[in-house]
Image (spheres, coloured by chain):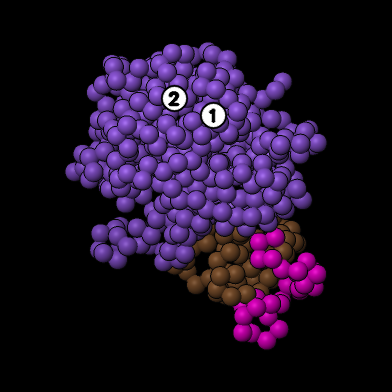
Chain colours: A purple, B brown
Amino acid sequence: MIRAVVTGLGAVTPFGLGVKTYWNGLAAGLCAIRPVTLLDTQGLRCRLAAEVPEVIPGSRRRSRADRLALAAAVEALEDAHLERAERAEVAVVVGAVGGGMFEAEEWYWREAGRGAVEPDRRALGAVLPWSHAEVVANALGLYGPRETLTTACSSGAAALAVASELVTTGMVDLVLAGGVDAITRICYLGFNALKLLDPEPCRPFDRERRGMSIGEGAGFFVLESAEHAAARGARVYAELAGYGMTSDAYHVTSPDPEGRGMARAMVEALTRSGLNAADVGYANAHGTATPQNDRMEGLALRAVFGAEGLLVSSTKSMIGHTMAAAGSLEAMATVLALVHDVIPPTVHLDSPDPEVAFDCVPHRARHAAIEHAISNSFGFGGQNVTLLFRRACT
Amino acid sequence: MQAKEVLDELKAILVSRLKFDPRRAAEMTADTPLPKGIDGAIGLDSLDFIELSIAIEERFGVVLDESEDLAPHFASLDALCRFIVDRTNGG
């Protein structure tokens, strides 16, 4: 049996550039949800978001999202110590939704007489979600299979699931996989109109939660067959031991009211990993802080794991919902929790919802050595993915 | 940067980013025309010029301003070298 292990990480997050910056922010329980600068939010119910605060490297001719992807991808490949020659056979799997929509909107806004920025019509060339995979493969010389997955908010997790499949079936030894999204007007204004955004920083699992906070970023992994990693002496962060992918097939925006699709994804991940529920110590929840998601996810977690012993936290309380990047950035938080023996907290959790009967690690990170952890991601329309990571053998 | 360094970098970009055969890049002289449709040119089309512009911005840290006429600077490697050297030396 071929096992898929994590040998490289790269991230651009609302805390800034790099995996180290990301983890330091999570472990310190910082909140990166601040007033929006990229969009005009005058008159909106919510005026906050978790934007990437720094100048993102790369030519301004590239879309913001392409630059996010490229910066994270470069870090992941360098972190895995893959030289150009070894990169030739690397596969690329990217979870994406917004593509270059931010720049396309700028162009359209201007055409409609509303924008102040001089638009570049060539920005339209990068509008489609597969632009990121193309840019990353072209700039870094990656000639293996290339896929783009669009499953709404679970896209980044779906990319890792499919990437692990490429490795465990023996198709390739190395995959660069992750998710990326930049803030866009259609996403921000759309969720604002649906009244799914909290005017304050989001409060997952809190009784008073009022919705999510939008974020942006990119998270990339190098996944590698364990044998290949051992042969070249690569550092192993963790093993992606299994995953589950299910559909609710229930409603366009609402999850199954009993969380059955979510629960099936978690059970599937356990089954594929050959583990029991009691083997899992931590769940990085989807935890969007919408009234519905957190209640359904709480039900589903309870149905699978019972209420005892499992630590649950939502890192969205710190970096917001980074959309197509969320699944991969939260998987990275899960992996780093295993590496550092530290569980990132759920910040802003002042009055826990009695319907979510878990220790949700409020306010402060907690020291805990965990063997196995899951990361949940649930996309609009019931597109559920659970990833299960195992601590690296030392 | 020196013109020679810039010229070598541009040839490397033609190979790595525009997927030129390395031998073809090596054979180019500084005055080989770049744009498609000119006799003896290496035949870059509009998409090639976009990719080349991105690569130049990222490699040399210059910003190419669309509001000025850039075509003369992209006429040949020699013209492009002079343009980049000028910009990177604070011109």
Position of A365 compared to A106: left or right? right
**How many numbered circles does the render carry?**
2
Q: Residue at x 61, y 84 (%)?
A: B37
In this figure, which residue is indicated by the disc labeled 2? A304
Which residue type does callout 1 highlight? Leu
User: Which quadrant would the C terminus of chain A be assigned to in this image?
Assistant: top right
Q: Residue at x 76, y 69 (%)?
A: B21
Residue placed most toward the observer, A279 or A380: A279
Region of the chain picked out in magenta, as a range: B16-43
Q: Are the residues tagged 1 and 2 within 8 Å (C-beta)?
A: yes
Q: Is residue A297 above or below residue A188?
A: above
Q: Is residue B76 above or below residue A257?
A: below
Residue placed most toward the observer, A242 or A79: A242
Magenta span: predominant SS is loop
Q: Residue at x 51, y 37 (%)?
A: A244
Q: Secondary structure at mark 2?
A: helix
Measured Cα–Cα span from mark 1 to mark 2 = 10 Å
Task: Tell me, yes or no, if residue B59 can be seen here.
Answer: no
Q: Position of residue B6 (x, y in %)?
A: 70, 60
Q: Position of residue A260 (x, y in %)?
A: 37, 34
Q: Position of residue A391 (x, y in %)?
A: 63, 23
In this figure, which residue is indicated by the disc labeled 1? A270
User: Which quadrant would the N terminus of chain A be assigned to in this image?
Assistant: top right
Which residue type does callout 2 highlight? Val
Q: Is residue A134 above or below residue B42?
A: above
Query: Which of the two discs, 1 and 2, labels the residue nearer the N terminus?
Result: 1
Q: Position of residue B64 (x, y in %)?
A: 52, 62
Q: Is B29 within the magenta? A: yes
Q: Label 2: how many residues lie within 10 Å, few (<14), some (14-19) or many (20+)?
A: some
Res A71 quadrant in image: top right
